[in-house]
Amino acid sequence: MTRILVDTPCAPMPQVTANFSEPTYPAWLRTYLDDEQQLIRSLDPFPFDQPSDITGYHSLHQNDYLRLCNHPEVVRARAEAATRVRVDSFSSSVFGGMGAEHASFVAMLRRSLQASEVILTTAGWTANVGLIEAIALADLPIYIDSDAHASLLDGARMSLGRRLLFRHNDPAHLEQRIAIHGSGIVAIDALYSTDGTLADLRRYVSICERHDCTLVLDEAHSFGMFGRNGGGLAVAEGVADKVHFRTLSLSKALGGHGGAIACGATIASSLWSRVRPVIFSSATSAVLAAAHGKALELTMQDRRAAEHTLTMAALLRSRLNANGVDTLGSGSQIISVKLQGTDAARLYWALRERRILTSVFVHPAVPRGISLVRLSVHAQVTEDDVDYIANAIVASLDALERQGICRRSVA
């Protein structure tokens, strides 16, 4: 019999009341947003309000891949840090906003990432946006994978550089674009959060070396999951010293909140005064830093949780592929099923009825005309769980297609 996972319940969604007078919005703004309103209405409801109590569900909607957020030692480290008397400045990192807990965590990050320096940020988003904006010269080409995280795209928009997309996971197309537009910044994900694919990192490193380009690698979903000491894909591929900048989100494998930029020590001294989210945002709390440090310590000491997670993900992919479900080339703990229109919402509810919680991606996370149901495999998933989940996905897709309300998309 399939074992149903038990997780700590999520906080209930706040109830929004409509008892207040609303401002009158200009007609041009209402018209501009109307297309998005139609999309949201078609999902019914949106945002997807996951159950407040997920006891008894297979929770494949969370990014806490190693289930460290509620690990007893992490909880203890967080609580102990909260009880220590301190004088926090609640200010920017450059104005004394970091203390001993931050310093200890940064030292551990350097060892894990094999990096000379690490700069902490308030989120993975601010790491990418702030870094790209800081290093892009006026009119400099910024080559971005078409499926890269939105924060890399927004960093390019906020910069003085020129944003140039290349086809997803296509180094040859990148090289063609560089031949036309010249040297610049290349921004890619190590592990793409929409489809779970991995970058051909060694090839990108080679291209950047040949064309004198700066490589920015977002390791948000790969950090903790790959490489010695959980250092990520660059460490796993043996090219940590060849990737100019790596960015992290601490809300994935470490189960916390925050971000970081890893780079050379010399260049870091210049970034401190250029990365605007670091200068103009308060540093994350010492309590979070203490929890992050303990989570990373556990990750570095024992890699079995990450290895088990990736093994279960590979098993789930094989089960789905054997039943005709395309897993879009995933090579990681993230597995997605692509559907047409907003049909992923239909599949989401069908799976929820079977006690499986997933994530739904629609525009702007993916191109218009398609949607994704994303599964995030985690360390508590067992082989019995994989069998149940795979069978539920296949049965749900078949049932929805028979009803004519769900159409699988052609990859």
Image: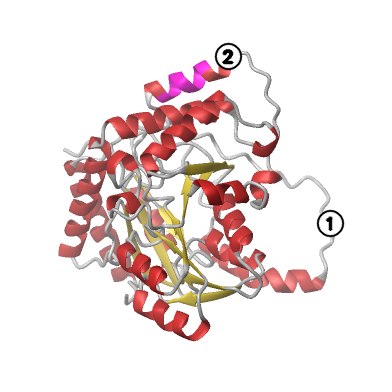
Foreground pick, 349 / 292: 292
Task: Name the residue: 67% across, 31% down.
Answer: 96
The answer to whether one can see residue 185 in this image is yes
Residues shaded magenta: 74-80
The picture places residue 234, in percent across and down from the top left corner, at: 34, 53
Task: Name the residue: 22% across, 41% down.
Answer: 308
Question: Local crowd at mark 2 within 10 Å, few (<14), some, or many (≥20)?
Answer: few
- Which residue is label 2 attached to? 84
**Residue 82 to residue 346: above or below:** above
Q: What is the three-letter code of the residue carrying label 1? A: Pro
In screen coordinates, is 85 left or right of 261?
Answer: right
Q: Residue 23 carries which label?
A: 1
**Residue 298 to residue 403: above or below:** above
Are the residues flagged by discs 1 and 2 in contact, CB closer than 8 Å?
A: no
Quarter of image, res 176: bottom left
By secondary structure, the bulk of the magenta-drawn segment is best described as helix
Residue 76 lies in the magenta-colored region = yes
The picture places residue 299, in percent across and down from the top left corner, at: 33, 34
Q: Spatial distance from mark 1 to mark 2, Cα to Cα?
A: 45 Å
Foreground pick, 404 / 20: 20
